[in-house]
Image: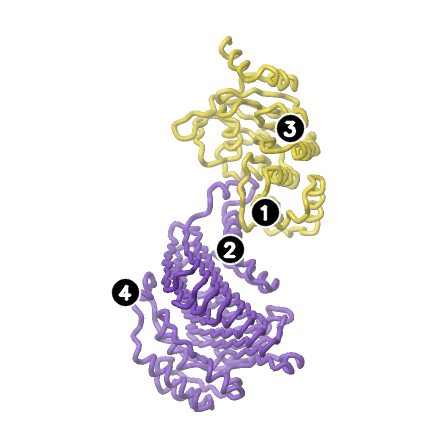
Chain colours: A purple, B yellow
Amino acid sequence: MNTPTTTLGILDAPAQTRETQLFHSADWFAHLRQQGWQRFQTLPMPTREQEKWRFSDTRTLSLEGYAPAPAPSEADVAKLLQRSQLISHPAGLMVHIDGHCVLEPQLSPELAKQGVIFESLEKAVKHHPALLKQHLLQHPVNLGGDKFQALHQAWLRSGYFLYIPTGVHVAQPFVSVQWTLAENSAVFPHALVIADDRAQGQVLDFHFGAQLDSRALAISCCDVHTGQEAKLERLSVQGWGQQTQSFQVDNTCGGRGAKIVAINAALGARRARLENTVRLEGPEANVNLYGITVATDGQEYDQRTLQIHAAPHTKSDLLFKNALLGKSRTIFSGLIKVEPDAQRTDAYQTNRNLILSPEAEADSLPGLEIEANDVKCSHGATTGQVSPEELFYLQARGIPLKVAQELLTQGFLEEVLSKVSHPEACDLLRTLMQEKFHRS
Amino acid sequence: MTPSLEIKNLNASIGERAILKNFSLTIPRGEVHAIMGPNGTGKSTLAKILAGHPDYTVQSGEVFLDGEQILGLEPDVIARQGLFLAFQYPSEIPGVTIANFIRAALVARQAKGAPFDAKAYYAQLYAKMDELKMDRKFTSRFVNEGFSGGEKKRCEILQLAMLKPKYAVLDETDSGLDIDALRIVSEGVNRLRGPDTGFGVITHYQRLLEYIVPDRVHIMWDGRIVHSGGKELALELEAKGYDWVKQELATH
C-alpha cells in the first residue's frame, strides 16, 4: 500500500496533492483528480433554499473532520474478508476497506478468455486508460450534488471497473463490497460498468460500516453504460454505519434496445442522499428503477431521480418504496424528462411511503417535463399508514402488534424485493431489513 | 363445570348507535352453536367485539373464555388465549405469503426464542391444505390477494385448522360460496369438531347447517338472543321466515 498515514483531512489541499502524487497514477488521471479538486473549491455548499435541496436538512451537512484512513491491519482484513462472503458463487468478488482494495477478483479463465474485465480502479487506470478516459466521470448531469461529486473526483482512487464485451453473457453476479472501518474515515467508492452490445450481466454492490454505528463520510459514484441490446441488473445496498453521511450519484445510460434493472436499497447512514439519473439514449431502451428504504429514528433519506428519454420508443419505469419508523424522514423528488425526439415514450414514476410512526415525515415531489407530443407518461405518489383492518386481521391470528406491523411493512416492500432476481442477494436484503426493523 | 365461552349481558355500540343489547350466550367446549338472524341484527358486530376489534365501544358486560375475562384485551392476546374468528370478509395482505402469515401466528404462540420446527410445520400445512383441496402453490401466494370468495374461506379454515383454537367463531362463512366450496369448507370444520373445541357459527341461512349440524340454534334479533332451541329450530325458521320471529316477539 502506498497511501501515507496522514493527519490532514479531505479538505486540505496538500493532502489531496500528496495522495495524487503517491498514487503513481497516469497523468490524465492526476489531471482528472486535480480538476475535481478545483471544481470542489469553487462550488458552494448546498442550502435548503435551492430547489434541488428542498426539504433536505442542510444544516447538519458537514465535510469537516474526515480523512482518508490508513490501510487496515491484517487482522481487520481477515475479519472483513470473512464478512464479505455474501454470495456463494460470484463471477468475481472485490473487497475494499476504507478505500483500500484488499481483495482483487479472480475471474475464471473462461471469463478472462472472453475478455471480461473486473478489476480495481487502481489497476484499471493503468491497464485500460482508453476505456476509462472515455467513460470515467463523463456525465454532465447534476441533480444538486455537484460539490460532493467534485470531491469524489478529487479523491478518486477506490472502486472497480467492470467490462463485459460484446455478446458475452455472464450468469453469476459480479460482487463488490466496500467497508468503512476507521472512525471518521472518508471513502469515495467508484463503480464503472460497461456492458457492450448484447452483453448480459449482474452487479451486486454492497456498502457497509464495519460497526453498526460507524461514523464516516462516503461519497460514491456509479456509472453504467450499456450497448445495443445489452441486459444488465444492478443491486446497490447502502448499509453504511448509522453515524455516516452518504452521498451517492448513479448515472445509467441505456443504448438501443438495452434492458436495465437498477435497484437501490437504503438501510444505513445517518443521512443518505441518492442522485439517480438514467438516460435512455438508444431507441427501445428499457429501464426499470427501484428504490427500497427502511428509515429508522434519526435517519434522513433524500432521493433525487431523473429519467431522461432522449430517443423514441423508450421505456422507463420507476418505483421507490419507503417505510418510515421513529423520527425519520424521506424525501423523494423525481423528474421525467422527455426530449423532443423521444416520441412514443412510456415513462412512469411511482413513490409510495409507508408511515409507521407519528414522528416520521415523507415528502414527495414528482415532476414531468415533456417536449414530445406522442408519449405515455404518468407519475404518482402516495403516503399512508398501515391499514387498521389489515392490522386487526393479523392481530386476530395472535400476532402481536409490532410483529404485525413488521409483516405488513415487509409485505409493502416485497413488491420491490421481488425484483432482485438473485435469490441469495434477495434473501440477504430481506434479512438486513428484518434486522434493522428489530433494532428499531 | 364444562369450560365455555360465556358472554354475559353485553351492551355495545358503534358511534352513537347501540348494537348489542344485553346480549348473553354460553358456548361450552365440544358444542357447535349456530347464531342465526337477519341482516343488521348485530351478528358480525358480536364476532368482532369478541375478537377485540377497536372500533366498538362496550358499555357493559363480560366475556369469559374458560373463566378468564377477555373483554378489553388486545386482539392478539385474545387470539392467543384461544379464540379464533373466521372473517366474513378476510383482508388482503399484499406481499405476505400464507406460509409466512400462519408461521408468524404459530411463532407468536411459542415461548420467546424457542426454535421453530419448519419441517414439521410444512408437513402439517401441506396435510391440511390437501384436506381442504387447496393447491400447494397457495403457500407462496399473498394472503387473500386475488382470491375468489371460496378460496378466501378455505384459507380461513386452513388457519383455523393450523391454529387449533379453543373456540372458533365463524362469521357468515357460507357467504359467497358455491355448493362445492360450501361442502369442502364444512367438512373442514367438521373435522375440527371434538370435545376440545367450541364453535359459534354465525349464519343468515339454514343452508350451512345442513353441512355443519349444530347442537344448539339461537335466533338473534335486534342485538340479543330471542329464541334458542335444538337443530330443528333452524328448519322451523327456514320454513316460517324471520317475520315469524318478529311476530313472536310482538306477541310476547
* Rendering quarter of residue A16: bottom left
Q: Nearer the viewer, mark 1 or mark 3?
A: 1
Secondary structure beneath dot 2 equals helix
Q: Nearer the viewer, residue B9 or B2?
A: B9
Q: Position of residue B176 (x, y in %)?
A: 59, 33
Q: Nearer the viewer, mark 4 or mark 1?
A: 4
Query: Which chain contains the residue that carries disc 4?
Result: A
Disc 3: CA contacts within 10 A as few (<14), some (14-19) or many (>=20): many
Query: How far apart are labels 2 and 4 at the CA level?
Result: 32 Å
Disc 1: CA contacts within 10 A as few (<14), some (14-19) or many (>=20): many
Q: Position of residue B252 (x, y in %)?
A: 51, 9
* Residues at marks 2 and 3 touching, judged by CB atoms closer than 8 Å: no
Query: Which chain contains the residue that carries disc 1?
Result: B
Q: Position of residue A254 (x, y in %)?
A: 49, 71
Residue drawn at x 53%, y 23% is B38
Query: How far apart are labels 2 and 3 at the CA level?
Result: 42 Å
Find disc 3 in the rendering and name its residue.
Answer: B29
- Residue A375 lies, with reference to residue B196, above or below; the image says below
Task: Point out which mark residue A49 bears.
Answer: 4
Find disc 1 in the rendering and name its residue.
Answer: B101
- Residue B251 lies, with reference to residue B201, above or below; the image says above
Disc 4: CA contacts within 10 A as few (<14), some (14-19) or many (>=20): few
Q: Nearer the viewer, residue A119 or A208?
A: A119
